[in-house]
Image: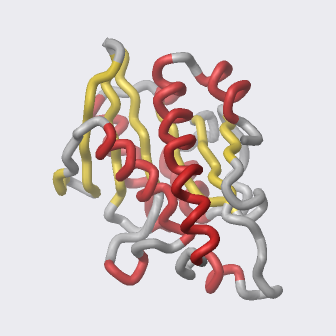
Amino acid sequence: MKKFLIVGLGNIGEKYTNTRHNIGFQIVDALAKEHEAKFETDKLGDVASFRFKGRTFVLLKPSTFMNLSGKAVKYWITKEKISLENVLVITDDVNIDFGTIRIKTKGSAGGHNGLKDIEAKLSNQKYARFRFGVGGNYPKGRQVDFVLGQWTKEEESQLIERIPMSIKAVVSFGTDGVANTMNNFNGK
């Protein structure tokens, strides 16, 4: 049976809930809910799993804070014996318009500290990443405040549509393959 590790990046703690930087957590939470999977606190994160179409999806929300996500990702890849091509990391991206999805099989961290740490711990850039656009509507030098800020009411109303689309993309990654998923969801 094929096994996939789906990592939602974010920060733990009440003050980070519902912030742009925690979209990875929001997407895996919604995915778990849709498939009736329950998160349990385990080593270096909260973990849930479900089976769908002959595949096992292991969902991870690292408890290491965003900038130290690599330790948790490496641990769970090893523990679950998941090959790197079956890993998908979901993160926010200020360089992409709000709500737009961009999935790639490899690449640079693009200035994202969570991805930088994952690359450093894995000594590799060849893992799939799912970038969810949060837009870049912030004054120069205020990026941290923006990504750690709460969604606006307008953004929240649009997330009602964008999160289910994101869930479909994640499931497609496991069932239809990364190339088909990129073709069907990138730019949407």
Q: Residue at x 25, y 47 (%)?
A: 47
Which quadrant of the figure has residue 6? top left
Q: Nearer the viewer, residue 155 or 39?
A: 155
Task: Please identify the quadrant where the C terminus is shown.
Answer: top right
**Rendered location of residue 74, percent (x, y):** 39, 44
**Rendered location of residue 40, percent (x, y):** 17, 52
Which quadrant of the figure has residue 183? top right
Q: Nearer the viewer, residue 132 or 129?
A: 132
Q: Residue at x 32, y 63 (%)?
A: 63
Q: Residue at x 38, y 43 (%)?
A: 31
Task: Please identify the quadrant where the N terminus is shown.
Answer: top left
- Image label count: 0
**Rendered location of residue 158, percent (x, y):** 61, 60
Question: With respect to residue 182, does 32 lie above or below?
Answer: below
Q: Is residue 69 left or right of residue 90?
A: left
Q: How is the image coloured?
A: secondary structure
Question: With respect to residue 165, does 86 lie above or below?
Answer: above
Q: Residue at x 45, y 72 (%)?
A: 18
Question: With respect to residue 114, does 187 lie above or below?
Answer: above
